[in-house]
Amino acid sequence: MDSITFSGVGKRYRKLWALRDVDAAFRPGEVVMVIGPNGSGKTTFIKCLLGLVRPTSGAIHVNGERIGADPAYRHHIGYMPQISQFPPALTIGQLLDMMRDVRGLSPERTDDGLVEDLGLSAQLGKRLGTLSGGTMQKVSAVLAFRSAPGILVMDEPTAGLDPLSARTVLGRAAAVRERGGTVLITSHLMEEVETLADRVAYLQDGTLRFLLPLREILARTGTDRLSAALPLMLADPR
Amino acid sequence: MRGGRAFGRAAGWTLMMGLGGALSAATWTVSPEGPHSGLKAVLSAAAPHDSIRVLAGTYAEGTVTIDRPLTLLGVGGPVIDGGAQGHVLVITAPQVTVQGLVITGTLVSNLQDNAGIHVDGVDDVRIVDNELRNCFFAVHLSNVRRALISGNRILGDPATPETRRANGIHLWRCTDAVVQGNLADHHRDGIYFEFVTGSRIEGNTCRGNLRYGLHFMFSHRDDYADNEFVDNGAGVAVMFSHSIRMTGNRFLHNRGGSAYGLLLKEINDSELRGNTFTDNTTGLMVDGCNRVHAEGNTFRSNGWALRLFSNATGCTIAGNSFIGNTFDVSTNGDLMLNTLAANYWDRHLGYDLDRDGHGDVPYRPVGFFALLVERIPYAIIFSRSLFVTLLDQAERVIPSLSPAALKDDRPLMRPPHG
Amino acid sequence: MTMGKVLYYTLVDLARNRSVLAFAALLFVVAEGLFLVEGEAVKAVLSLVQVVLALVPLVALVFTVVYTYGAQEFTQLLAVQPIGRSAILGGRMLALGLSFLVALLFGLGLPLTVHAPGATSLVLLVAAVLLAWVFLALGTLIALVNRDRARGVGTALAAWAGAVLVYDALLMTLLFAFSDRPVEPFVLPVAALNPIDLARIAVTIQVDLAAMMGYSGAVYKKFLGSGPGIATALAFMLLWVAWPTVLSFRVFRSKDL
């Protein structure tokens, strides 16, 4: 069964359609990379899934349930936003405790392995207001993974991270896939997409141009690089 | 001085009577147990200048008349009950003293001024330390010289309707009277004077009277000192009189649409010193007065502390304190021929660079809002609105509506007393 | 349950923020200063009335607006958790309301109780708390409706000026213009439509009763001095808390974060 389905989802901000009639289904055990130019609707796409933005039309189902006012489905979702900002007066440790409390996670069911892996252990006492952008992203990554979610959503996860941390985070994402989870990642780094993606979704002007296995894209275009395949695909997506 | 002279005369006469009594007068005793049990019988048997001791008990003999100079002295609070037949006690002879009696049972009538003690046309009467309960008029004097009314408790019933009430102490065409230390409550007017001159009213308390605590008209050269007027329907009204001195009186809690701590109407050449006006709808209203001098008075927590009408002339308001009033001064026209000088105004925010105790720039106590409320009374509900406060400040800096002369050139920086 | 957690963590954040504490301290210093300078409790309370009627709505409104914008990231963080929108907004509004209550009890209630215990002080305190809540609700609504922070703060300031100044100015102008017509019965009800005016009248009828009685005071006293009148006034203030709150929930439930 599909873990996430978008059926005719559209989102209009005043006169501008940021997302237009998107149909898509995502399965357990796959990583889907969502790509597209700036302003193509990637973030809106993700925000719709998370309930941060209410679609103007269409429906989204998570694990068979249509999402709406009931927030329970978000128990299954871990989310790492593109830019993280936290209450500046709290320390990292306090934030982690608070978010665990808010999510109703018990300490033993909380997977904080990333704290160690990203080198945050020594910084738990630091106030969030004093952190660098990279460290904030690390904290954000910890929050996304710790509930061992069945669905992982990451918006440009590696943008602010050093290469080593980026690899750690992407490795974790791959582990979620191995565990049978669904992973959605937006990115603009083609090499990153090529190493991780099972399927690639391409958004342009709010429209889903294609959602195809990476292998098929390469085979169809007869290239070995996604960056080379894209122009050919866009010329003739079918 | 005038009151003092009146009191001196009364005291001198007492001395004479005392000497005469010692030489020739007899002392009678009336008691319910006998031998003399009838008050009227003893009064008609007694010789002039005799004393009659009235022992405790109730004497219900209808209207009792004292027609010769006698001293009637109650012992243990004997009750004289008139049985609602007219007056209770009528004094028709001079030099009568009535002391220590409890008097009740006047007939309420719209045609007659029935009183607990009624005196007409005789002089040197002393009415001392009596209690008058639920009388129509309590003490009613007309055409009396040198009366002493002192230490009486004149008690009405709060439940009595207005039509069945008359005045507590009522004097008409009297001179040189002394009215002191009496309590008058729940009557129509507590103390009422008409054509009463050269008299002294001192240390009395008038409270809960339906109309005025003190009401006088055409009564010149009188002194009013240290009296207290509390919770009267319309406060105190004094009209059409001249040469009045009012000192150390307290005007409290007189509230209502037309209630005044003190209303002065057509009063000339008079003085107000050291009085306190607290918690009245209007503390002091000055209407059509000439040359009234108010000094050292304290106006506290009144609706309007002072309403100075523009038909008043030559009045001076000096050295008074205005504290916590909704309005300090209001007036009703553009003309102002009176003087405000060196008062303390709690709203005054001026400075005193030369440290002489007076603000360096004139203070204008009449705000825009006071003038507005004078024109549109129900605008009062905007009291203490920020808009009103700002307008008032603007009005004080750039006076455009209030009379230009209505200002205090030397406002005090601190209250002048206590 | 989850609302309780949002309430708790917002309170923790507000306690760290110190602005509410500063507000309480400011009120306390102003109140104590007035009692000290005036020397007379009556006068100090009268001055406090004006300070409170202007300052409390302003602080409640501006603080709520600024805090709501400042909490946007925190709100997003909460909104992607399994927490409903109503719990997020409800928890935050409750936390702000509680903070204002505590600030007013300390900053205003304490000096009033020490220097001028009595009915007037009680009415003033209750009016201050209700006003704080009214403008908390209005501030929340303003911040939710205006995406742009500068515009939100501007709207809040305009709303405050309107309630504290412009409304009375307009009403008094109308009163002046129609002073020859029988508008008297409408003045109080129309003035009381404005929560600041309602609070002011409720307090001043205690303080300036003498002057109020000068005019057909029976009407006002009957309205605001009696049990049903107090109940009406309270209900009206709560209505002013309720409608922006309800609207805020409605806006927030479908708001794009």
Image (tube, coloured by chain):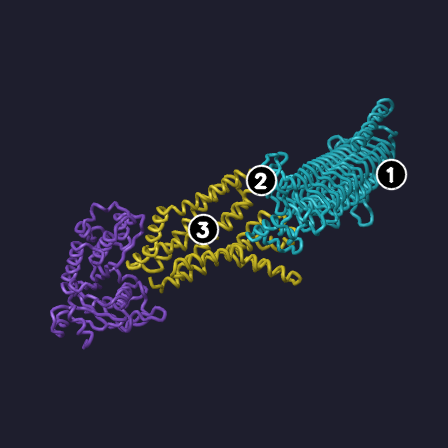
Asked if badges 2 and 3 are on one and the same chain, I answer: no
Q: Output the letter for the chain in cyan.
A: B
Residue nearest the observer in this picture, B254 or B94: B254
Image spot of residue B150 (x, y percent): 76, 34
In the rendered structure, the answer to whether residue C16 lies left or right of residue B395 reads left
Tell me the distance, in whole angstroms, between the alpha carbons under discs 1 and 3: 74 Å
Residue nearest the observer in this picture, B286 or A60: B286
Farthest residue, direction top: B23
Residue type beneath disc 3: Val
Secondary structure beneath disc 3?
A: helix
Q: Circle 3 is placed at which residue position?
A: C59
Farthest residue, direction front: B354
Residue nearest the observer in this picture, C1 or B250: B250
Name the residue at 37% across, 56% down: C69
How crowded is the residue under tag 1: few (<14 C-alpha within 10 Å), some, or many (20+)?
some
Pointer 3 indicates a residue of which chain? C
| Mark earlier in primary sequence (2, 1) | 1
Q: Quadrant of the N terminus of chain B?
A: top right
Give the number of the disc on residue B351: 2
Pointer 1 indicates a residue of which chain? B
Residue type beneath disc 1: Gly
Quadrant assignment, res A150: bottom left
Tell me the distance, in whole angstroms, between the alpha carbons under discs 2 and 3: 31 Å
Asked if badges 2 and 1 are on one and the same chain, I answer: yes
Q: Output the letter for the chain in purple.
A: A
How crowded is the residue under tag 2: few (<14 C-alpha within 10 Å), some, or many (20+)?
some
Name the residue at 63% across, 35% down: B416
Q: Considering only vertical position in the picture, is C98 above or below C176?
A: above
Which mark's residue is nearer the viewer, 1 or 3? 3
Q: Circle 1 is placed at which residue position?
A: B121
Image spot of residue C163 (x, y percent): 51, 56
Name the residue at 22% across, 50% down: A107
